[in-house]
Structures are given as structure tokens and as C-alpha cells.
Amino acid sequence: MINDSTSLNRCLAFGVAVALVGCGTVNSVSTRSTTADSAVPHVKQVNDAIDNLFLKAREVRLAPAKSGLLEAQVDVANDDFRVRRFMYRFDWLDAAGGVIESRLSAWDSAIVESGGSTTIRGIAPTRDAVDFRLQVRASDR
Amino acid sequence: MSVFSATSLTLGLATSVLPMGCGSQPKYVEPGGSEAIMTVGDVDPREIERVSLVMLRSMMKEGAFSRGESNPPIVMLEAVVNDTASEFDGQAITAAIFEELTNSGTAKVMMIEGPNISERARREAVNRFKETGQEPPDPDFALKMRVTSVRRSAGSTKLYTFYFRMELVHQSGPNLGIAAWSKQESIGKQGEKGTIGF
């Protein structure tokens, strides 16, 4: 009886392991436990935008890049059991709130493996940019 | 007999109406959007838009153009070398970069088209300056791009991987011939045939 139970548990564990490998699930771990110095308090607003894509924003950062232009970074995690594909676009705003027209404000695609995460990035076209606007939409390819 | 004729007529009508219903009307789409056609073995407008964006984003982020001798630097844009079997407009990528660099004031760009035309374009530029009695400026950088591809198949499924390599090379000063910035973007496309829409 004990032997049967052990065998059953082993089979179950093996089955779960094979299923996870089959789904391509990513296990993530990070050594950082505090928020970044460049983090901005807009995670909730980003989550409201990407919630229907079954994705979660972990952190939003906004800081000057090496060139001095502002760079936005959003860490997006996929806690779902399916690979998620989506498109995103950063529009940049000047101090007066106007949208700066630029080739850098174009749709880009991203893929997040199940259990994994990715960082979507946008770089400001000029030094006039002070804020950004993020748009996201689902995509299946 | 009349029942058979009626059935045939209904079937005939249905088969003639069906293709019309399934056909899609032409419409405007965003070339880089998810509604655009996607093929397996070719570089599509969607990829051109993406590569332009990725390259621009990287060179703007790294501040590659601030490493030139003059400010804003003069950039010589060379023709895209296409080493793939796919026919596409490589100038569409460099034109997007030309537009952004020029309009943002990041660099002064000399647009050069066609393979091995750099010297001719340079002579023409020299002649234009001679007419005005000025000395032509030396470019600070040359922006070069090469596209290659690898094709693999398993049964009827094909995988095409396109590699887009771009580099910004010093054309004057102590760093002549040395790359100031470089970026490679790879795009993998797998499937049996192209698709449209979501």
C-alpha cells in the first residue's frame, strides 16, 4: 500500500515536471529586493492598462540614459500558463503636455514566456521630453 | 426531379455567395501593426518598421553621435547591403533613421543611395561646395547596414532568421575606421505560409 502510494506520487511528480517542461514555463529569481532609485509610482496605472492581457507590471523606471535622453523601462511579468504576445508604444510628452512627434513612437512587439518577465523600453526623441504615455494591445504573433 | 433542381440551385447559390462573404475588402492598415500581412520567407514592412525602431532606439540611447568631431556630427548614410533572397526596400530603414536624426537635430545626414556610390556622391558634394567657394565638410561617421538570413526546415514548417547588423564607423579624427556604435537585431519567422490579421 505504501509502495503503491509512493509510486503514484512519483508518477504525479514526473507528470507535473513533464507538463511544466512541455509548457516552457520559466522560473524566475532576482537578487534585488528593493525598488530601483529611478522607479516611479505608476505601477498601478500600468497594471490597469495591461491587466486584460493577463500581464503584471512589476516596476516602472524613468531616468536619463547615457545620451542624456530620458529612458522609460517597464518590467512586465507573465504569471499565466500561456506564452503572451503583445504590442506596445511609448509616446513622449513635453513640459507643456504636447506629444512629440517621432519615429521612436512606433508600435513594437514583445513576447513573455509563461512564468517569465521582460522589460519594455522607450527612449525619448529629444531632451524636451519629460513624461511618457504607454499604449498596449494584444497580439497573437 | 424538381426537388433535386431546387437543392442544386440552393447549393450553387450558396457556393457562389460564400467566397464573396469570405473575401476581405481593402482597407488602410498600419505597416508595423498586427493587422498587416506577415509572410514566412520575406522581410515584411512590419519588420522594416521594427528594425528601424530598434536601431534608432539603441543609437539614441547610447549617444553614439556625441562621439564625433563636430556637433552635430555629419553622418554619411551608406546603402543597405542585402545578402538575403528576400527583395525588400532597405532604404526604407535608412530613410526612417535619416528622418529622425535630421528632424531631431541629432546629426546632419548625407543621404547616399545605391551600392558603391559613396565616392561619386562625395565628388558631387565637393563640386557643389566648389561652386560656392566653400570647403566640403568631412563626414564624422558612416552608417553601414547589412542584412543576412538563415533558412531551416522541418517537414513543411520553415524557419527563416534574418540578421540586421548596423554600425556607425568614425570617418575622421583619431578614431578613423573604428566603430562608435554597433547593433544586431535578429528576427525569426516560422510557419508554413503567411497570415493576415490577428
Image (tube, coloured by chain):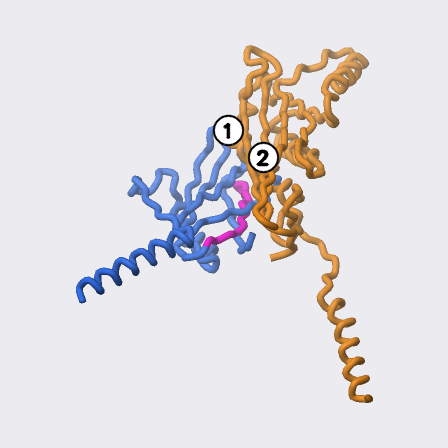
User: Residue B59 falls in which quadrant of the image?
Assistant: top right
Q: Secondary structure at mark 2?
A: strand
The chain carrying label 2 is: B
**Number of callouts:** 2
Q: Secondary structure at mark 1?
A: helix
Answer few, some or many: residues within 10 Å of disc 1's Cα (few below 14, many 20 plus, some between 14 and 19): some
Task: Write down the region rendered in magenta.
Answer: A83-96
Residue type at numbered disc 2: Tyr
Q: Which residue is mark 1?
A: B62
x%, y% of residue A29?
32, 44
Q: Establish if B37 lies above or below B43.
A: below
Q: Earlier in the sequence, mark 1 or mark 2?
A: 1
Answer few, some or many: residues within 10 Å of disc 2's Cα (few below 14, many 20 plus, some between 14 and 19): some
The chain carrying label 1 is: B
- What residue is rendered at 58% in x and 26% in y? B167
- Magenta span main SS: strand
Report which colour depicts chain A. Answer: blue
Quadrant location, the N terminus of chain A: bottom left
Instruction: Inspect this view and state whether residue A99 appears.
Output: no
Q: Establish if B109 lies above or below B131.
A: below
x%, y% of residue B162?
60, 37
Q: Which residue is mark 2?
A: B163
Magenta span has B8?
no
Report which colour depicts chain B. Answer: orange
Q: What separation in Å lies between label 1 and label 2 (alpha carbons)? A: 21 Å
- Disc 1 + disc 2, Cβ < 8 Å: no
